Image (spheres, helix red, strand yellow):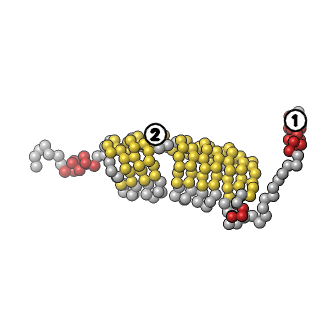
Amino acid sequence: MPKNTPKKSTILDNKSQKCGLRHTVFSVHGDEYNGEWRDNKKHGKGLQLWKKSGATYNGKWKNGKRDGYGEWSEGLRSGWGRMYYESGDTYEGEWMKDKNHGQGIIRFANGDWYEGNWQDGKRSGNGKYYYSDKGQLYEGFWVNGVAKCGTLSDFGREEAPSPTMYPIPQVCLVNMQLVLEEARLAHRHQCC
């Protein structure tokens, strides 16, 4: 073998280096990536498929991490996006630092759903939660993932698989102005 000829292992290693546009590359776990590379790292536009969870990401990459267009920043979900969970749940809405944050809706595999405000991955602020098994809708205010103040009403009760024995009665104010005036007076007495 001439002295200037590289070893076979060096040739194979050079061929396996990833830089530029490549066809689909499979990991040992069955995950797939099809896109651009730089210095053996995903860099540029690419599509990643995770076999186990079924999740996909189609967007920009920077030094091996999701970044820029595709709703990611510094390798974390950020901005508007959609997430399909292994459990069958789906979240669509705003993200910040890899957590649900802002407006969003989560649809659970059991048919329940929540739509409203999120903060640090928890329901927070105004929102609606639909209980599909009972056919009831809660509308109200949430703090740290816990419902604090709101109303519960029948919503699709007729189609629900296990509705409550008795429907929730409609509540109507006969004289709304009188109720508001009494509330103002009570508030004034507490302040004085």
User: Does 44 sit left or right of 185 as displayed?
Assistant: left
For image coordinates 29% across by 46% down, the residue present is 17
Q: Determine the residue positioned at 32% across, 45% down.
A: 21
Number of dots carrying numbers: 2
- In terms of depth relative to the viewer, which is nearer, 92 or 186? 92
The residue singled out by tag 1 in the image is 188
Are the residues tagged 2 and 1 within 8 Å (C-beta)?
no
Which residue in the protein does label 2 denote? 68
Q: Can residue 71 be seen here?
A: yes
User: How far across and how far down the image is residue 110, in percent?
Assistant: 61, 61
At label 1, which amino acid type do we have?
Arg
**In this image, 65 relative to 140: left or right?**
left
Q: Position of residue 60 (x, y in %)?
A: 42, 42
Q: Residues within 10 Å of mark 2 (few under 14, many from 20)?
A: some
Disc nearer the start of the sequence (2/1): 2
- In the picture as drawn, the residue positioned furthest to the top comes out as 192
Residue nearer the viewer, 155 or 148? 155
Residue drawn at the location 39% of the way across and 43% of the way down: 45
Q: Please state which of the two labelled residues, at mark 2 or mark 1, is closer to the viewer.
A: 2
Q: Kindly report the distance in space between the C-alpha atoms of the residues bearing marks 2 and 1.
A: 53 Å
Residue 186 appears in the figure:
no
Q: Secondary structure at mark 2?
A: loop
